[in-house]
Image (spheres, rainbow, N blue to C red):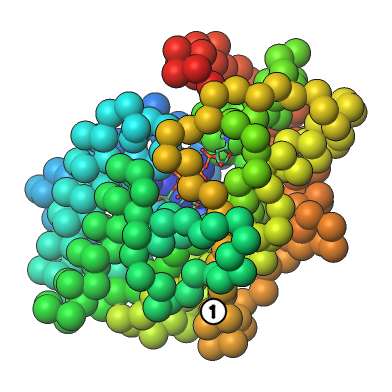
Amino acid sequence: MRMLVTGGAGFIGSNFVRRTVKTRPEYEITVLDKLTYAGNRANLAGLDVPLVVGDIADAALVDGLVAEADIVVHFAAESHNDNSLEDPWPFMHTNLIGTYTLLEAVRRHGTRFHHVSTDEVFGDLALDDPARFNEHTAYNPSSPYSATKAGSDHLVRAWIRSFGIEATSSNCSNNYGPYQHIEKFIPRQITNILSGLPAKLYGTGEQVRDWIHVDDHNDAIHLILDRGKTGETYIIGADNDHVNNKQVIELICELMGLGKDAYEHVADRPGHDMRYAMDSTKLRTELGWRPRFTDNDTGMRRGLEETIAWYRENESWWRPQKEQVEADYARKGH
Ligand code: NAD
Ligand code: DAU
């Protein structure tokens, strides 16, 4: 089975490739990745997986690669909300034009396609709203990032309905784990503390993200590839919608041997989504998925301990980017 993985040198995609190599030797993987600031060759180090450096919006390149694949798993995206507020264009290019380019290629070649998307397409919930997002929730994206991901989801649905492509989609909540770019919340705090800098909380930190370990996300994608029904969408979430950013930062400080309050408040994100919560009943009941990274307080303690250990042990992976990332955040007031 020949599998093309777009964005396979990024955070979730490279964890997916590692996990697939380890657990599913039947797949022969090729990675297509542009190696933007978020992609890193080192994420695939030690794996015997070809990496094609190129753009998913390059129709000729994509056509040739899709022609050689039995299945395409599409992770490539511009993925950071804060960046989309500063310059939305790369998000339009990759998330919309890039996804369109892949869809046209899989349509021509009759290739199975899986589209990786996010809970942010649904917008946010109020803190006191007990609702959870499910497969029928209306789309209501807030940022240029989430609007372009919502657009890409609509493209996939239209290509399924109008052209009959064999595709599935998944919408997952916030991931954490090894190889996550240090611009993102959890690795930024861990690497700040390892650098002797304070952890940085946006605003009051009341916002809730439904955190999931990246391996649990990727296991769900494999189940969808194995047993999912084409044409369908699956919600992925690990039931952590009771933990707010302040509690996560406090837990990181505690696990790293500091006082719970060893962080500072910085400027909030404009239009900051308040709460995400995922109802993954369909995935659990129809495909039998269960998250492995759970515990009974925050649901993240073991996963965070392992993630902190990974950043401690892999300083050479993140150190070269730290100064620039923090300089960019300082310029934005974060
Ligand atoms: P990431 O930013 O870490 O990685 C994205 C990868 O895509 C990078 O390797 C980058 O080089 C590559 N890329 C960007 N533009 C490209 C282009 N034009 N052509 C080819 N490659 C390109 O992102 P991530 O956090 O690993 O997210 C992967 C996917 O999962 C995205 O589609 C994102 O929307 C989705 N998602 C992420 C989360 C999360 O919490 N991180 C949660 C749910 C869904
Ligand atoms: O929900 C899924 C989404 O999760 C994915 O689609 C995105 O690709 C991914 O980046 C993530 O989006 P968020 O905007 O939720 O993630 P981020 O890591 O940027 O921020 C998580 C929360 O932490 C958010 O409420 C903002 C806050 N935050 C972030 C940073 C970087 C802080 O309090 N301090 C920080 O330094």
Nearer the observer, 226 or 92 = 92
In the depicted view, which residue is nearer to us: 105 or 281? 281
Q: Is residue 149 left or right of residue 154?
A: right
Quadrant showing the N terminus: bottom left
- Tell me if 291 is positioned left or right of 169 in this view: right
Q: Does any portion of residue 20 appear in the rendered image?
A: no
Picture layout, residue 325 above or below residue 97: above
**Left or right: 115 with respect to 156?**
right
Which residue is tagged 1? 283
Question: Which residue is at the front of the view, 76 or 146?
Answer: 146
Q: Residue at x 30, y 42 (%)?
A: 144
Residue 247 sits in quarter: top right
- For the point 54% across and 35% down, the residue is 184
Tell me the residue at 77%/62% (across/down): 294
* Quarter holding residue 52: top left
Asked if residue 199 is positioned above or below residue 176 in the image, the reply reads above
Residue 42 percent location from the top left of the image? 51, 31
Of all residues, the one furthest to the bottom in this rendering is 286
> What percent of the width, then of the height, locates residue 200?
65, 25
Residue 114's quadrant in the figure?
Answer: bottom left
- Respond yes or no on whether mark 1 lies under 8 Å from ligand 1: no
Which residue occupies 66% across, 24% down? 265
Q: Is residue 20 above or below residue 323?
A: below
Where is residue 311 drawn, in percent x and y?
70, 31
Residue farthest front in this picture: 128
Residue 66 appears in the figure? yes
Question: In what element is the residue under mark 1?
Answer: helix
Position of residue 115 in the picture relative to residue 199 (left or right): left
User: In front: 90, or 73?
Assistant: 90
Q: Amino acid at mark 1?
A: Leu
Mark 1, other Cα within 10 Å: few <14 / some 14–19 / many ≥20 = many
Query: In which quadrant of this rendering is ligand 1 seen?
Result: top left
